[in-house]
């Protein structure tokens, strides 16, 4: 997604991260829904670690993120905390291909495990994680493109369809400046349906 003239534009991509294509005159940031200690040894995070590494060794990114959390967050990043981890690695594929200078680390779990959320817990958690991510990225004027992925759908085993629906709603409400209606969306399934109809027509 990107902001153009204060309007949020969203595109959907399904495929391997190295096949993603977009152009930007500014910089981009990739979302990492990892764990609280910054481990990037599996799934989407491992692909992201390869993308940001300079020598093609994902472990360098893994160590960098872990050390960043130690130095800037006393070794632990609580689930839902949105932290922008910047890189100065000009030889990385992330920079050369996407002008990606940062990872937005938003842990969806403390350690890799099945989350076991109810439907309502999934909606409330994923909505808040998405909203917090957008708030943090919007604070950085140098960032133009924000690449996101499903939250908690890997190790966490959250239902992909429900996660997607919730993320889209959060993005649409954020882009439409509908913060005052968030409680109605989260607390009432009936009002949630009405808000989604308003958003999507």
Image (tube, grey):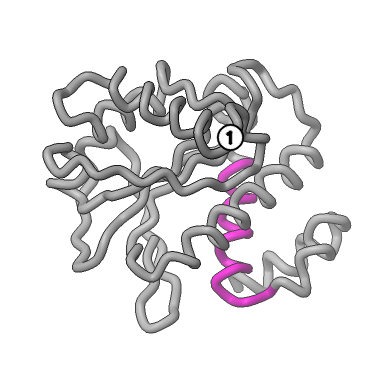
| Residue 74, picture quadrant | top right
110 lies left or right of 119: left
- Report the predominant secondary structure element of the magenta stretch: helix
The residue that mark 1 highlights is 107
| Residue 200, picture quadrant | bottom right
- Percent x, y of residue 58: 28, 21
- Percent x, y of residue 193: 76, 61
The residue drawn where x is 87% and y is 57% is: 188
- Name above or below for residue 83 compared with residue 3: above
Q: Secondary structure at mark 1?
A: loop
Which image quarter is the N terminus in?
bottom left
- Percent x, y of residue 132: 61, 55
63 lies left or right of 184: left
The residue drawn where x is 45% and y is 34% is: 68
Nearer to me, 118 or 141: 141
Is residue 35 shown in magenta? no
Which image quarter is the C terminus in?
bottom right
Is residue 166 shown in magenta? yes
- Magenta region: 162-178
The residue drawn where x is 54% and y is 72% is: 175
- Percent x, y of residue 150: 51, 39
Nearer to me, 69 or 116: 69
């Amino acid at each position: 997604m990107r902001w153009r003239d204060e309007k949020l534009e969203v595109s959907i991509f399904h495929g391997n991260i190295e096949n993603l294509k977009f152009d930007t005159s500014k910089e981009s940031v990739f979302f990492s829904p990892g764990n609280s200690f910054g481990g990037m040894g599996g799934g989407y995070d491992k692909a992201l670690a390869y993308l940001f590494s300079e020598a093609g060794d994902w472990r360098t990114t893994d160590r960098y993120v872990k050390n960043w959390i130690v130095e800037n967050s006393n070794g632990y990043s609580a689930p839902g905390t949105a932290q922008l981890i910047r890189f100065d690695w000009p030889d990385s594929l992330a920079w050369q291909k996407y002008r990606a200078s940062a990872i937005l680390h938003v842990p969806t779990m403390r350690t890799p495990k099945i989350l076991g959320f109810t439907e309502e817990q999934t909606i409330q958690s994923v909505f808040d994680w998405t909203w917090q991510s957008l708030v943090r990225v919007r604070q950085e004027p140098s960032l133009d493109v924000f690449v996101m992925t499903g939250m908690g759908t890997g190790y966490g085993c959250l239902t992909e369809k429900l996660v997607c629906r919730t993320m889209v709603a959060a993005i649409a409400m954020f882009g439409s400046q509908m913060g005052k209606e968030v409680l109605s969306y989260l607390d009432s399934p009936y009002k949630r349906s009405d808000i989604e109809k308003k958003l999507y027509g």
